[in-house]
Image: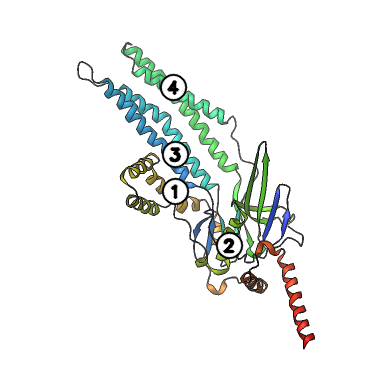
Amino acid sequence: MSDSSWEAGARRTTKDGCLLALSPEPVMTGERAVDVNTWIRRKTDGWLDLQHGNLLFGAEFSLMFFSLSLLSIGFLGFGLMFAVGPDHLGNWDWEAPLFMLVGNLLISLPWGLYMHFLGNKAVKETPPVRVNRQRREVAIARLTGGEVYKPLFWSINTGLIAYIVVILTIGFLFSAVTQENASDEYRSMLVTWGLSILGVEILVIGTYLFFALRLKKKHDPKLVYEIYPWEKLVAYIETRQDIGPGLMATHTVLTLAIPKPDDPESALAAASINVGHETAGLAQWECIRQFMENGPEACPDPKEDETLAHYKAKCRQARKDMSLLPWLGKKVGDWFFQRYLAHIITERRIKTLALRSLPEELKAWSAPLPKEQWAKPTEALQNLNQQLARAYERGLKFTQMGLVSEWQAGREEKQQQKRGRGRFRA
């Protein structure tokens, strides 16, 4: 992005498609500011956070394992017990419910917790892009410190083998306790051996994970934020065509990038979001530009789809609009995915967890400034935006105008020719 042709309005052909430059000089595009892809996550008077990801789906997916546990224990466990009925002495056989309870504690619960903590990890490792209108600067995160640390002897297969070994040991213990024909001494010996083996396994695995996680936290790449002037930020919409065997797909991506000082063609830090279409990308870009130039009132508010208040209001509206059977079907789906609890978890992730992992330097940079210390837009950018606003009123389009500098030069030349013709006639 170092050559003179890289400016707002420029179009370039890339290996897999083409791109449209939006900045440096973040001029107005004439499009309406619409948060098409729900990129706006938090908004204050001073700064705006851009963070994508469907956090609600991840919470619902992890809580689904809890619902599956209750259904399996209720229908398979207690259902089988009631189907068999009591014996001739009136005693119920609790083996089936107990078996389903232990099975869910060993299988459904670990997988649900794994998906839950995986969602928390994704929130922490997808830091927001923050734009500060008072300082007229942009902060984009990047990782420093080398490659991701991989603990010795650990892989997905190793973890799966360790999990299966523990499950088999617990299964052995369960079978030892429920043996009916064995003597008390033999059953006691089996239980002792099973508990000893299980204790050794937990001790070895727990100690390994304790040291591995500490080393991973110490050696993993660190999150840092690069701060860059707003009017020099590189922004563009790229449309790519991915061609495969029997398939061609078009992807349109909006990218914000901070160029490397020693290599302006490469990004020091960057953030992208799939916008689907160039027009949608312009609308998404206008959300950011309007916030920086005209304040938070000109920018859409964060979507409330993932908040608990929105979910409650949606449920009340559904009860009014739906007949009884569709409404009951919706309530069954809400219970199965535990949507009430999922919204609580998601709201906590958005408001607390995502902000907890941000560096202290970013928090200090985001502190509000006295109004007299606010940075001001350059006079050149203000004049250019005024000229573009009049051009858009005449029906011109940003996507058809080409380089802003060339358009401006051509416009001034036409004005001079028009003034010259007027003097000649006079």
Looking at the picture, how far across and down is residue 342, in whole percent?
Answer: 41, 45
Q: Amino acid at mark 1?
A: Thr
Tell me the residue that label 3 is attached to.
62
Q: Residue at x 73, y 55 (%)?
A: 12
Crowding at mark 1 (Cα within 10 Å: few <14, some 14-19, many 20+):
many
Separation of marks 1 and 2 at Cα, in angstroms: 27 Å
From this view, report whether residue 217 is shown above or below residue 259.
Answer: above
Q: State which quarter of the image contains the C terminus.
A: bottom right
Tell me the residue that label 1 is attached to.
346
Q: Nearer the viewer, mark 1 or mark 2?
A: 2
Looking at the picture, how far across and down is residue 1, in whole percent?
Answer: 73, 57
Crowding at mark 4 (Cα within 10 Å: few <14, some 14-19, many 20+):
some
Toward which corner of the image does residue 197 lie, by quadrant? top left
Tell me the residue that label 4 is attached to.
169
- Looking at the image, how many numbered discs can be counted on the residues? 4
Secondary element under disc 1, as helix, strand or loop, is: helix
Residue 108 makes an appearance in the image? yes
Looking at the picture, how far across and down is residue 186, in whole percent?
Answer: 35, 12
Tell me the residue that label 2 is attached to.
286
Separation of marks 3 and 2 at Cα, in angstroms: 35 Å
Q: Which residue is outermost to the left? A: 89
Q: Residue at x 77, y 60 (%)?
A: 3
Crowding at mark 3 (Cα within 10 Å: few <14, some 14-19, many 20+):
many
Q: Nearer the viewer, mark 3 or mark 4?
A: 3
- Which numbered disc flags the more N-terminal residue, 3 or 2? 3
Crowding at mark 2 (Cα within 10 Å: few <14, some 14-19, many 20+):
many
Q: Residue at x 68, y 41 (%)?
A: 243
Looking at the picture, how far across and down is residue 147, in whole percent?
Answer: 64, 41
Q: Amino acid at mark 3?
A: Ser
Secondary element under disc 4, as helix, strand or loop, is: helix
Q: Amino acid at mark 4?
A: Thr
